[in-house]
Image (cartoon, grey):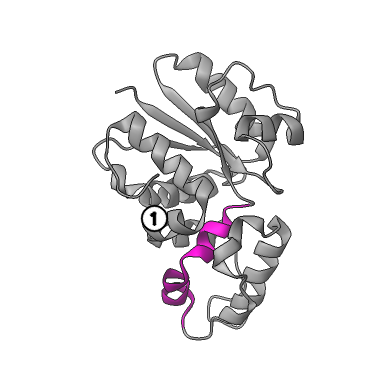
Amino acid sequence: MASVRICVEGGGKKRRGRQLVRQGFSRFLREFEGAMPAVIPCGGRDETYEFFRNEVQKHPDAFVILLVDSERAVVAPPSQHLTNADGWDLSEIDDQQAHLMVQAVEAWLIADRNTLRDYYGSRLNENALPDRRNLESVPQSTLKSALNQATKKTPKGGYHEIEHCSEILARLDPAVVRGACPHCRRLFAVLSRETGVALPNLQ
């Protein structure tokens, strides 16, 4: 099997932020231990695209994945969605290399309510969170404002996009997230195929 490299949006410009994102995503992908993809936090959205293009050139024998927020409803295959939304040229890649967090990574966090309760404690206001049955239809801005509203009275204070997101990602139950977020399930199905690590219920 070819090595897998994931260029993921997030982490900001500082080394610590990117280290936190790498740790969070690596723990979220823990089912692939032994064939773990290399997680590469790239900072901003455009930086992630440019880094992805460079990685494809630098590592022709690897399976390089682009993973970014969709930032809006998805009505086309991921590569076409990103071409339409961002003007990115993805014509030379396999669509299986383009992946989306729909409509943002916060949907994955909200999908696993048990982990949110454990992380934020009893003062988490779950009534402020959107229905997990239709998470990929929730706008990006709503996901983030809902998390802020739900967490602002907890001991950790309001949701912090880098610190809290990375720590929660590391604790999530991937099977629960895959069950609520079809685009997450798609990512895991591709990773399972490319790494040779069989996972249940990915169809």
Q: Position of residue 129 (x, y in %)?
A: 61, 73
Left or right of 34 in this view: 188: right
Could you tell me what secondary structure mostly forms the magenta stretch?
helix
- Between 195 and 17, the one nearer to me in the picture: 195
45 is within the stretch colored magenta: no
- Quarter of image, res 179: bottom left
Furthest residue toward left: 34
Q: Position of residue 56 (x, y in %)?
A: 51, 19
Q: Residues within 10 Å of mark 1 (few under 14, many from 20)?
A: many
Tell me the quadrant of the picture where the N terminus can be found: top left
- Quarter of image, res 194: top left
Residue at screen point 30% across, 42% down:
32
Is residue 29 in view? yes
Q: Secondary structure at mark 1?
A: helix
- Which amino acid type corresponds to the residue marked 1 in the rendered image? Pro
Residue at screen point 66% across, 57% down:
137
> Which residues lie in the magenta part?
104-121
Furthest residue toward front: 203
Q: Position of residue 185 (x, y in %)?
A: 45, 47
Left or right of 171 in this view: 180: right
Is residue 16 in view? no
Residue at screen point 60% across, 68% down:
159
Tag 1 residue: 174
Q: Residue 84, relative to residue 159: is it above or below? A: above
Q: Position of residue 5 (x, y in %)?
A: 43, 30
